[in-house]
Image (tube, helix red, strand yellow):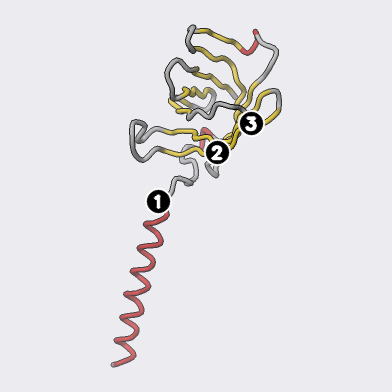
């Protein structure tokens, strides 16, 4: 009888620890990207916005940009093949952007570290906004 009581206590303890461990996984923002159509390499097509409301098409400039999104929740922004920014990509859990898919800078070779919001995407087109006043929106394609 004593061994059965110990087994029950042990099972309760294991159940308690399992519940804590499994529920704590969702408390962190380093979750994988839950949108498979985002994963992969995206080529910059155009940008628009800014203080002057400019429209910049990739064919009209002498540089290229690329965005690489990984299932791990990491992303890298490239200009002319050189990495200029790294991001963590996740759904915001609080604040003004709650529920939105955001790209938060984690390392940069540029002076600006602006959060970006992925606001529209399908298998062929990806649209991203800088989260600031008078900033740019970007359109990427596969």
Q: Earlier in the sequence, mark 1 or mark 2?
A: 1
Residue designated by label 3: 109
Which residue is painted at 47% across and 26% down in the image?
121
The quadrant where residue 77 appears: top right
The answer to whether residue 120 is above or below residue 48 is below
Q: Is residue 116 visible?
A: yes
Residue designated by label 1: 26
* Residue nearest the observer in this picture, 18 or 55: 55
Tell which tag, 3 or 1, sits nearer the viewer. 3
Check residue 106 in the rendering and tell me which mark sits there, or answer none. Answer: 2
The C terminus is located in which quarter? top right
* Residue nearest the observer in this picture, 85 or 3: 85
The answer to whether residue 23 is above or below residue 43 is below
Q: Left or right: 4 with respect to 39?
A: left
Q: Position of residue 8 (x, y in %)?
A: 31, 81
SS at mark 2?
Answer: strand
Q: Measure the C-alpha gap from mark 1 to mark 2.
A: 20 Å
The answer to whether residue 27 is above or below residue 134 is below
Within 10 Å of disc 2 (Cα), the crowding (few <14, some 14-19, many 20+) is few
Which residue is painted at 61% across and 27% down in the image?
110
Q: Measure the C-alpha gap from mark 2 to mark 3.
A: 11 Å
SS at mark 3?
Answer: loop
The N terminus is located in which quarter? bottom left
Q: How many marks?
A: 3
Q: Measure the C-alpha gap from mark 3 to mark 1.
A: 31 Å
Q: Position of residue 95 (x, y in %)?
A: 33, 35
Q: Left or right: 132 with respect to 78?
A: left
Which residue is painted at 53% across and 19% down in the image?
139
Q: Position of residue 106 (x, y in %)?
A: 55, 38
Q: Is residue 40 visible?
A: no
């Amino acid at each position: 009888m004593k061994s059965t009581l110990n087994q029950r206590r042990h099972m309760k303890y294991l159940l308690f620890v399992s519940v804590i461990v499994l529920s704590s996984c969702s408390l962190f923002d380093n979750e994988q990207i839950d949108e498979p159509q985002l994963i992969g390499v995206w080529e910059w097509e155009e940008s628009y916005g800014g203080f002057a409301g400019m429209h910049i098409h990739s064919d009209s400039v002498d540089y290229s940009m690329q965005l690489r999104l990984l299932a791990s929740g990491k992303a890298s922004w490239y200009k002319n093949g050189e990495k200029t920014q790294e991001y963590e990509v996740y759904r915001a859990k609080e604040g003004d952007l709650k529920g939105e898919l955001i790209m938060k800078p984690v390392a940069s070779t540029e002076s600006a570290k602006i959060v970006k919001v992925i606001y529209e995407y399908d298998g062929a087109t990806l649209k991203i906004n800088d989260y600031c006043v008078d900033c740019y929106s970007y359109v990427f394609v596969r």
